Amino acid sequence: MNTSKLFLLTLGFYIPQVFAQAVPGTLNWYNGDGQGMHTDQAYKMLKKKKSQPVVVAVIDSGVDIEHEDLQGKIWVNTKEIPGNKIDDDQNGYVDDVHGWNFLGNANGENQENARLEMTRIYAKYKDKYDGVDRASLFDATEFFMFNEARAKVEGELENLLQYKEALDNGLFDEETKKYIEDQLNYNLNIYYDDRSLIGDNPDDFSDTNYGNSDVEGPDALHGTHVSGIIAAVRGNDKGGDGVAENVKIMSVRAVPNGDEQDKDVALAIRYAVDNGAQVINMSFGKSFSLHQNEVYEAMAYADSMGVLMIHAAGNDAKDVDVEPNFPTSRYEFQEKPFTHLLTIGASTRMEGEARVADFSNFGLETVDVFAPGLEIYNTVPQSAYMNLQGTSMAAPMVAGAAAMLKSYFPSLSMWEIKTILLQTSTRYKDFGFPMKSVTGGIVNLKSAVKACQKAAKSKK
């Protein structure tokens, strides 16, 4: 890690390490034994067993559906005729052959950058609450949310502006320079209109006539990498192997460079459920959420339909039992827990104290289990490959694991598979690991297959 990134990390800005090549000796470590998920051993146990395809929705930045290592792994909506500009299946989305893009308009234009949610909140209530005395409040909850958002935005802007001169003098590498510029120009800019291109009202959840069928979008690096972890062709020596073999990826684009809109997340979840996804991967999150009820209702809908949601815990090295990462498994107004949701922390290939990735969020009550999330080499756009890290990489490990188990054991419900993944995780009792999640474990597919074999046999 270079010095400029280290400075930003000390100020609370997480920038993932990016390498164009796999770190020596790490290719496919996540599928192996040791600190991996024992995926390869699990497949050896299933050699003579047939599988059925499972649809996994990837709500993300977009997916390069033409990637060489994802061929045959992309979901096709057979009820839709490509390119005829007609909603053939009458699901409300025209030409949604491989999914839907909620970050675009009918003219084929796509949004790339967005503000952070705290920036939107600051901008939304600035005129209303600037200079307001606490004693005169009309809506205390709204006011406190505004004050917290304003403090964080202004604090981060102050930190970044310390490096403006160094930025202008070219003292940062291109990656860090882009990060700072994006933060200043888009993410933390309260005057940036990040919804004009799309043309909808992001506060009106009944205004659903927007988006387009471009499921890749302008920057699909993150979503393509996530999809490769789940589904990349196994054993072809082209990159990292996917966790699930018989799987179809449904691309639902809803995550820009910035924070996702709650409306897009809610509609994306509903789209995935209504179009046949059995697993939904959600490698995104934010510390503020303006429309929590609507996102919760969408998640409750997926829950009621037996669709397993997999959510990344986040990369702030914080306890999300105390500071939620939205969407969360535990909303303040929530009366009963979700039964089809897993929140995933990131583990490493190291042992001992370094087993937990230093960036990973954790939570004894709200993070369920850990999975590999460091030095993960897999697919990125233009049939290329890259090494990335984050809980964004750990979540699709578990989405792939769930899809793999469902494909070989279709008689088991997603709730049963979720339960087995938790019960069979490899438990560690050292270095405080049991306090980092509900299970204190890392997903173990070999053990999960054994448990699924037993559970499926008992149903016959």
Image (tube, rainbow, N blue to C red):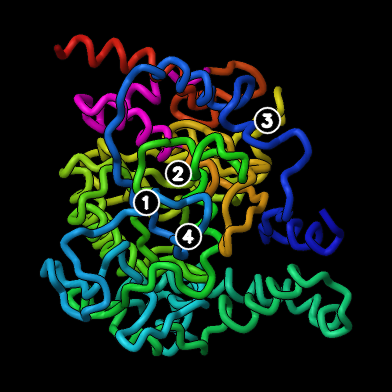
Frontmost of labels 4 and 2 is 2
Residue linked to disc 4 = 286
Residue drawn at point x = 39 percent, y = 19 percent: 46
Q: Is residue 404 above or below residue 319?
A: above
Frontmost of labels 3 and 4 is 3
Residue linked to disc 1 = 249
How much space separates mark 1 and mark 4, taking CA atoms?
24 Å
Q: In which quarter of the image is residue 82?
A: bottom left
Residue 95 placement, left or right of 367 = left
Q: Please give the label number shown on residue 349.
A: 3
Residue sitting nearer the eye, 100 or 121: 100
The answer to whether the residues at label 1 and label 4 have Cβ atoms under 8 Å apart is no
Q: Quadrant of the C terminus?
A: top left
How much space separates mark 1 and mark 3, taking CA atoms?
27 Å
How much space separates mark 3 and mark 4, taking CA atoms?
27 Å
Please tell me which of labels 1 and 3 falls first in the chain: 1
Q: What residue type is labelled 4?
A: Lys
How much space separates mark 4 and mark 2, taking CA atoms?
26 Å
The answer to whether the residues at label 1 and label 2 have Cβ atoms under 8 Å apart is yes
Does any portion of residue 16 appear in the rendered image? Answer: yes
The answer to whether the residues at label 3 and label 4 have Cβ atoms under 8 Å apart is no
Q: Please give the label number shown on residue 231.
A: 2
Frontmost of labels 2 and 3 is 2
Q: What stretch is highlighted in magenta?
A: 398-426
